[in-house]
Image (spheres, helix red, strand yellow):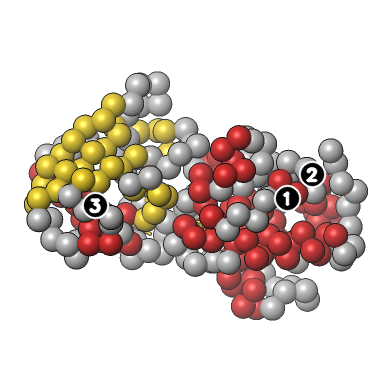
Amino acid sequence: MKTKLKILRQASVESEPEWKTYKLQVEPEERLLDALLKIRRNVEPELAFRSNCKSGQCGADAMNINGQPRLACRTLFKDLANPKQVTIRPLDGYRVLKDLVVDLKEVEQLGGEIIEKSVDKLTSPKRTNSEIREAASCNLCGACVPACPVTWNNNLFPGPAALLKSYRLLGILSHEDKNRQLENINRNWGLWGCETDYNCLEVCPREINVTELISRLKREISSGEERCSKVE
Ligand code: SF4
Ligand code: FES
């Protein structure tokens, strides 16, 4: 099958982005990531994108494919509505470092200070091991952030990935750290900015029930299980 890949290229942070089209022969079962690797190998060695595990685990190759945040290694041509004409651009809402590589530090910065603990030390009297494992399986690929409509108009909203991280951490933090973490998110534009749109759930390559875990965090705070005065 002949296909045209239209890719939004950007040479550096300061450069203007421009569309480039690449024509190539692919198989319907082929992954988008394989096509990008082919282009880099045979046509355009400068084409920048991340990939690591090539098996849907690390989240490195999250990008916008035909208007949707997806992982290139988990997207087959035959699964696309129009596999003969594919548009690829970097994830929306992030600073572009080069071509399809975005600055994912912003996933965490959007959430303000997030207090991190080593994943292997995560145990919680409040959360079951499977709940912790589900929340901790987030690879910070960043796909859920541009998929969430609240982030489109409000750059103060932490976004699903940062709220998920808070959910995971609040079950295990000491009292003082917990209060600091709650102050970060217990705001109208923080946790309460989430409109339960479920978009994050649809795009998450790890199939984490992000919306449900964020809703659970809201319930815990509303019911007084987690205490902190709300900030406007
Ligand atoms: S919650 Fe899912 S989509 Fe969002 S950053 Fe984590 S793995 Fe990626
Ligand atoms: S390369 Fe790791 S998820 Fe695609």
Q: Nearer the viewer, mark 2 or mark 3?
A: 3
Query: Against 156, is 228 above or below?
Result: below
SS at badge 1 = helix
Give coordinates of residue 49: x percent, y percent: 31, 44
Q: Quick check: marks 2 and 1 in contact, CB under 8 Å?
A: yes
Label 2 amino acid? Arg
The percent coordinates of residue 16 (x first, y second) are: 35, 21
At 44% from the left and 62% from the top, the residue drawn is 205
| Residue at numbered disc 1 | 191
SS under mark 3: loop
Q: Residue at x 57, y 44 (%)?
A: 149
Judging depth in this view, the residue of 226 and 82 nearest the camera is 82
Identified by mark 3, the residue type is: Asn
Task: Write down the quadrant of residue 34 in the picture.
Answer: bottom left
Question: Does residue 80 sit above or below 92 in this rendering?
Answer: below
Vertical side of 150 occupied by 10: above or below: above
Find out whether the residues at labels 3 and 1 contact each other: C-beta distance under 8 Å: no
Query: Can you give x and y, in whole percent of width and height, for residue 120 in the image?
Result: 60, 70
Task: Using a 10 Å C-alpha cutoff, classify the residue at mark 3 as few (fewer than 14 neighbours), some (14 to 19) or many (20 or more).
Answer: few
Q: Which residue is mark 2?
A: 187
Q: Is mark 2 within 8 Å of ligand 1?
A: no
The amino acid marked with disc number 1 is Leu
Task: Measure the alpha-carbon separation of dots 2 and 1.
Answer: 6 Å
Q: Which residue is mark 3?
A: 82
Tell me the quarter of the image containing the N terminus: bottom left
Q: Residue 139: percent from the left, percent from the top? A: 50, 58
Inter-mark Cα distance, 2 to 3? 42 Å
